[in-house]
Image (cartoon, helix red, strand yellow):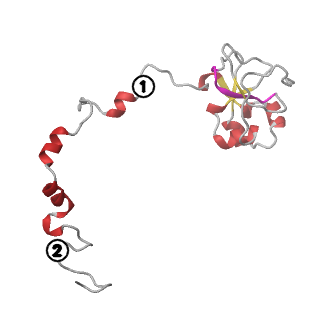
Amino acid sequence: MPRRGQHDQSPGDGRNPFSDQGGPAGRHAETHDVRREELTNPTGPELDRGQEFAADIAPDTSAVEPGGHAEESRSAVDDKVLHERLSMLDDAELARLSVLEPGARLEQGGTYVDLNDSSRQPFKAIGGQEADAKHRYVAKRDTDHELWNELVGPDREPLIERPSTANSST
């Protein structure tokens, strides 16, 4: 028997268990009926291997129109009132900011902010809401993250529905 601190270099050493018998798989084959295990182990439901798993669980979005208000908004850089009201933003940032045109329908559950509201409290739109001339709505989904945080502040949770006491001075 080797002394403590010395290792036996023969097959079957602790560093190479069962190396003389084909490794752990070989040792397993000596102690178990591997063929019988393969036949009796549960395999799960039979799957159609022709389809990928991701395709099975992904929703079909081929008929879904992309969201956003690109066709029904204008750039804030064209609005002189917003130049004064949002003086912390430069022209390049105002150009990236899309303000909804009057008559544009707000997406139910979408997050918006009214730039005419002095508190700039974000809100979630309810069904049937649409932009009008008294409000300058900006959709969160159409605004990049940094610009949105500049407008409303970081980590500000939206109200569930449009507040009725908004400051709507134009």
| Residue sitting at the far bottom | 3
- Counting from the top left corner in percent of width and height, residue 125 is at 69, 21
Q: Main secondary structure of the magenta part?
A: loop
Residue 80, given in percent of the width and then of the height, sits at 80, 32
Q: Which residue is mark 1?
A: 59
Q: Answer with left or right where residue 66 lies relative to residue 122.
A: left
Residue 9: where, in percent of width, then height?
20, 80
Say if mark 1 contacts mark 2, CB within 8 Å. no
Residue at figure coordinates x 35%, y 28% from the top left: 56
- Front one among 11 and 108: 11
**Residue 129 vertical placement versus 116 (above, below):** above
The amino acid beneath tag 1 is: Pro
Mark 2 surroundings within 10 Å by alpha-carbon count, few (fewer than 14), some (14 through 19), many (20 or more): few
Magenta residues (range): 107-116
Check residue 112 for magenta coloring.
yes
Q: Is label 1 in a helix, a strand or a loop?
A: loop
Which of the marked residues, 1 or 2, is nearer the chain's N terminus?
A: 2
Q: Residue at x 12, y 45 (%)?
A: 35
Residue 76, x across and y down, in percent = 72, 32
**Residues under labels 1 and 2: Cα distance?**
55 Å
Horizontal placement of 11 versus 71: left or right? left
Name which residue lies at 23% across and 68% down. 17
> In which quadrant of the rendered view does residue 97 lie?
top right
The residue identified by callout 2 is 11
The image quadrant where one finds the N terminus is: bottom left
